[in-house]
Image (cartoon, coloured by chain):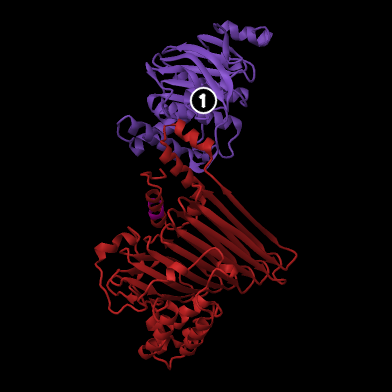
Chain colours: A purple, B red
Amino acid sequence: MLTIDNLHVSVEGKAILNGINLDVRAGEVHAIMGPNGSGKSTLAAAIAGNESYEIVKGDILFKGENIIELSPEERAHRGVFISFQYPVEIPGVTVTNFIKTSINSNLKARGENEMPANKMLKKIREKAALLEIDSKFLSRSLNEGFSGGEKKRNEIFQMAMLEPSISVLDETDSGLDIDALKIVAKGVNKLKNKDNAVIIITHYQRLLDYIIPDYVHVLNEGKIAKSGNKELAHELEERGYDWIK
Amino acid sequence: MQLTEKLLSSFLAFELDIDINSSVHHLRTNAIKNFEKLGFPNRKLENWKYTSLNQIIKEDYTVFSKKRNVIDFKRVQDYFIDNIESYKIVFVDGFYDPFLSQTSHDGLDICIMSAALNKPKYSNLINKYFNKAAASEDSLTSLNTAFSKEGAYIYIPKKNVLEKPIEIIHFATGNEAALMLQPRNLIIVEESSEVEIIETHQSLTVNSVFTNSVTEIFAQKNSKVDYYKIQNDVISSSLVDNTYITQKRNSDVKVHTFSFGGRLTRNNLNFYQKNPSINSTMKGLTIIDYDQLVDHHTLVHHSNPNCESHQDYKGIYSGKSTGVFNGKIIVDKIAQKTNAFQQNNNILLDDKSTINSKPQLEIFADDVKCSHGCTIGQLDQDALFYLRARGIPKKEAKALLTYGFANNILESVNIPELKFRIKKIIAKKLGVNLGFDL
């Protein structure tokens, strides 16, 4: 589904990723771990198409198509989703208004009709319930004054609404207490199926107790230094990152 | 002929046409003398530093349209609020249009200035209120007073809560190559009465129109006035709107000004608080592009204790457009416990757009809460990326952020149909097809 081939990415002229290779197939969960500054969030930003991140070399193939020249919205239309580490606060735009505009923009781009209002509301209620989100929350301005946990739950709520083919969860566990973490993990597991894939970017192993990865990769200095199965995550938890270099 | 000379000589002709023995006529003659002395304001004056009328007054305006022009309702129905009952006071090229209007004398007066100025039954109220709030020293106000003849006249007696809003619409047909209009509105809201008013100036062609409007509002004890100004005129029209509001004890007056259209729009919005415990609110939303200019000059004079004023003006400027915000707050020594807030936030979308923002606080009392703030920025690039990463195309994402920025100004619009109409105008202005709500 997603093939990253020898990806080199720079930010303001500084090389951050130095040749990433990754192959994610439908139905898989991959975890990308690594110390701070190893390039984890840069990888997420490059997949999403953030224009501040310059792709110097290499390709990102999604369902066989090279997406590196595509705009962020075009990637979203094809089914790429990023759960942001720091979701932006947008005053004056409610969660409902935002998700409605997002869904209809995606449908329109795919040549489909807009979703009827009643169907939209039904889906919003259903997915909000899955993430244990109060309906009052939906009429608040997007992320404005949300707690860390609320922001992250709201990201997964959006993922549930958009039903992407690949979801990159960038440090979704940071700032979450254990209850919120369980809700988020439950949501992700519920959405997981044989046709989609998830990449979990995390510093810690604890989210991986709830969302079991098929593969674990360790990023160091902009390269995948080691890959393994879920046991690798436990090993990292015990031994830290220093032994991988 | 220069416009100033043309106006001065037209005054003589105007006097042949009206009752010069009426009680207001000496106000007109004093006013024309004042205008003769001052002329049109220029940029040497502090209050007109950023806004030049030079190009506007160069044109050869017809000062009085010669003939009454009739317009078909179908042609203009889009400018009325949809799906809602309302009183309507409609003018076409400065003349009252009885076919498009829905006035009333049923226990109140929602009618026209020419009747109020000429009929004896109104003379007591005219003598009491006409030109009593307007600043007699201001040159453009004087010019309007000199030629005051037609406009909306609204008198709401005690304890009347109007269920229908009042729409005041001034149309220009473009039958004159260039037309100057000087509507004069007088609105008196007596004790414990409530009214909602929507004012629109709309030209129907691209022929030049220059409107110099004066509105006086008297809000008596416990009264409530919600006033909405919809400034979405064509690009060849200019408007100077002078509004003077006098408030009595416990009254609550809100003025919303939505400025999207026109070539040059200057709002002089003045609040005078005559008793304690008064609330005055000014909200403004400006979205302009090209060479458009919108200038908001506000004044709140706190001359009594325990009063409040709230000002919230937002502007979004594209192209080579220019915005001006000058908010003056005067707190007299006696006006203790005043709460006066002023906020002006701006987004510049292009390198060539400009905003001049100036708070002007003159505070002589010591126990007051006064604050003012001003921001100038661009659209948040991280927010833009966030929306795009959710599949919202760049143009729509920008529009959504712009709408979000402006949203709190719309929130306090109490007429849903009007709010809907303004949202539609905003979407059109931003070139997107978004409903903005669910």
User: What residue is at 33 percent from the left and 76 percent from the top?
Assistant: B96
Counting from the top left corner in percent of width and height, residue B324 is at: 54, 60
Is A26 placed above or below B373 here?
above
The residue depicted at 57 percent of the width and 72 percent of the height is: B247
- Dot 1: within a 10 Å radius of its alpha carbon, few (fewer than 14), some, or many (20 or more) residues? some
Residue at label 1? A54
- The region drawn magenta spans B420-424
Please say whether residue B422 is one of the residues in the magenta stretch: yes
Which quadrant of the structure image shows residue B297? bottom right
**View extreme (front): residue:** B1
Regarding residue A172, the answer to whether it shows in the image is: no
Task: State the residue in front, A118 or B392.
Answer: B392
Most distant residue in the bottom direction? B21
- For the residue marked with disc 1, what is the amino acid? Glu
SS state under label 1: strand
Position of residue B52 measured from the top left corner of the image (x, y, whole percent): 50, 66
In the depicted view, which residue is nearer to us: B120 or B257?
Answer: B257
Residue A28 drawn in magenta: no
Query: Where's residue A206, x and y in %?
Result: 61, 16
Q: Give the number of marks.
A: 1
Position of B315 relative to B89 (above/below): above
Q: Work out whether residue B35 can be spotted.
A: yes
